[in-house]
Image (cartoon, rainbow, N blue to C red):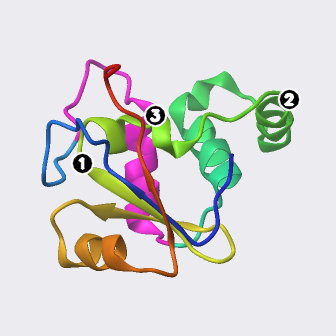
């Protein structure tokens, strides 16, 4: 699912009230860490699909899958929305989608996060909870 004019807030049961860096895990870099880097380096550059494609390209560069092949694979099934991302569920990062559906990552607890949370012109959507209520 792709959003426009939307702010995805951190999950109600997110253990962090302020954004933290996801910890490293072994030799492989988790996709959420790749996506965090991409969004911080280029805010409002990626749409959701473009973010998924670019992170797949970087996740396993030895795979030798072309961008066109990744796009075809990504489009062949539903893309999990960023409300499911560990960034919003566990590590305290929100997502702002502009009018064109381009995304910026916003750290919880920051002045920018607090301002986006109060905006009436944005659809306010919480990330999915970690546990069932």
Q: Seen in the image, is 22 located left or right of residue 64?
A: left
What residue do we see at 45% from left, 80% from top? 120
**Label located before the other in sequence (3 or 1):** 3
Q: Is residue 127 on the magenta stretch?
A: no
> Which is more toward the observer, 91 or 56?
91
Whether 52 is drawn above or below 60: the answer is below
**Label located before the other in sequence (2 or 1):** 2
Residue count near mark 3 (Cα–Cα under 10 Å), binned few <14, some 14–19, many ≥20? some
To which residue does mark 3 refer?
A: 31
To which residue does mark 1 refer?
A: 92
> Which is more toward the observer, 38 or 12?
12
Q: Seen in the image, is 7 located left or right of residue 56?
A: left
Q: Quadrant of the C terminus?
A: top left
What residue do we see at 38% from left, 53% from top? 37
Q: Position of residue 90 (x, y in %)?
A: 26, 35
Q: Seen in the image, is 72 located left or right of residue 58?
A: right
To which residue does mark 2 refer?
A: 76
Q: Position of residue 91 (x, y in %)?
A: 24, 41
Question: What's the CA distance linking mark 2 and mark 3?
Answer: 19 Å
Whether 93 is drawn above or below 55: the answer is below
Q: Which residues are magenta?
A: 22-43
What residue do we see at 22% from left, 38% from top? 14
**Label located before the other in sequence (2 or 3):** 3
Residue count near mark 1 (Cα–Cα under 10 Å), binned few <14, some 14–19, many ≥20? many
Determine contact: label 2, label 1, CB under 8 Å.
no
């Amino acid at each position: 699912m792709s959003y426009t004019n939307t702010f995805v807030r951190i999950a109600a049961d997110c253990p962090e009230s302020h954004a933290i860096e996801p910890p490293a895990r072994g030799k492989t870099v988790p996709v959420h860490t790749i996506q965090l880097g991409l969004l911080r380096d280029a805010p409002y550059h990626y749409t959701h699909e473009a973010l998924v494609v670019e992170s797949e390209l970087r996740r396993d560069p030895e795979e030798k899958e072309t961008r066109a092949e990744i796009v075809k694979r990504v489009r062949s099934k539903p893309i999990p929305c960023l409300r499911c991302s560990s960034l919003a569920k566990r590590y305290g990062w929100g997502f702002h989608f502009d009018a064109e559906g381009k995304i910026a990552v916003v750290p919880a607890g920051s002045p920018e996060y607090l301002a986006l949370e109060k905006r009436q012109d944005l659809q306010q959507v919480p990330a999915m909870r970690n546990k069932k209520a």
